[in-house]
Image (cartoon, helix red, strand yellow):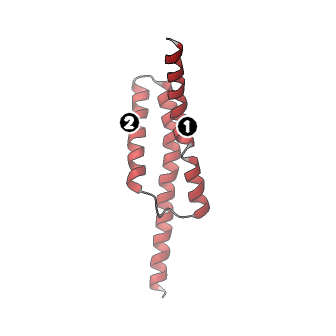
């Protein structure tokens, strides 16, 4: 491989991991604000689908950078999804409670 191919391969591998790192500020913001009002559930479910597809590709084609990078991204994305479900459930329960007691 020439140097350009090596650089592209390295950037690709780094980008897979960085895509997960870029989700961490969203996780922190949700945790601090306790709100997921403006987040799209469908978007994060779509991300999960494609991340799982990439992980399967990495597994079946023995592509370790994809397998590791997308696994990390999937973990970060799953945390956001869990936060969406958790805070929407809490907010919905609080709204129902307030309606019953007004």
Question: Residue 46, image x and y in percent?
Answer: 38, 47
Label 1 secondary element? helix
Question: Residue 66, image x and y in percent?
Answer: 47, 29
Residue sitting at x 54%, y 24%: 10
- Mark 1 — residue? 18
Q: Residues within 10 Å of mark 1 (few under 14, many from 20)?
A: some
Q: Tell me if residue 77 comes above or below residue 102 in the rendering.
A: above
Q: Quadrant of residue 41?
A: bottom left
Of 69 and 29, which appears nearest the observer?
A: 29
Q: Tell me if residue 45 comes above or below residue 39 in the rendering.
A: above
Label 2 secondary element? helix
Q: Residues within 10 Å of mark 2 (few under 14, many from 20)?
A: few
Residue sitting at x 56%, y 58%: 30
Q: Residue furthest bottom?
A: 102
Q: Quadrant of residue 14?
A: top right
Marks 2 and 1, Cα distance to the nearest angstrom?
Answer: 18 Å
- Mark 2 — residue? 53
Residue sitting at x 51%, y 57%: 83
Residue sitting at x 39%, y 25%: 60
């Amino acid at each position: 491989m020439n140097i350009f191919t090596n650089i592209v391969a390295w950037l690709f591998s780094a980008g897979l991991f960085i895509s997960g790192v870029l989700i961490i500020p969203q996780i922190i913001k949700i945790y601090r604000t306790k709100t997921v009002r403006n987040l799209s559930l469908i978007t994060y479910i779509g991300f999960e689908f494609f991340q799982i597809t990439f992980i399967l590709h990495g597994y079946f084609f023995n592509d370790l950078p994809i397998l590791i990078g997308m696994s990390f991204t999937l973990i970060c994305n799953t945390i956001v999804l869990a936060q969406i479900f958790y805070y929407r459930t809490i907010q919905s329960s609080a709204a129902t409670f307030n309606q019953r007691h007004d």
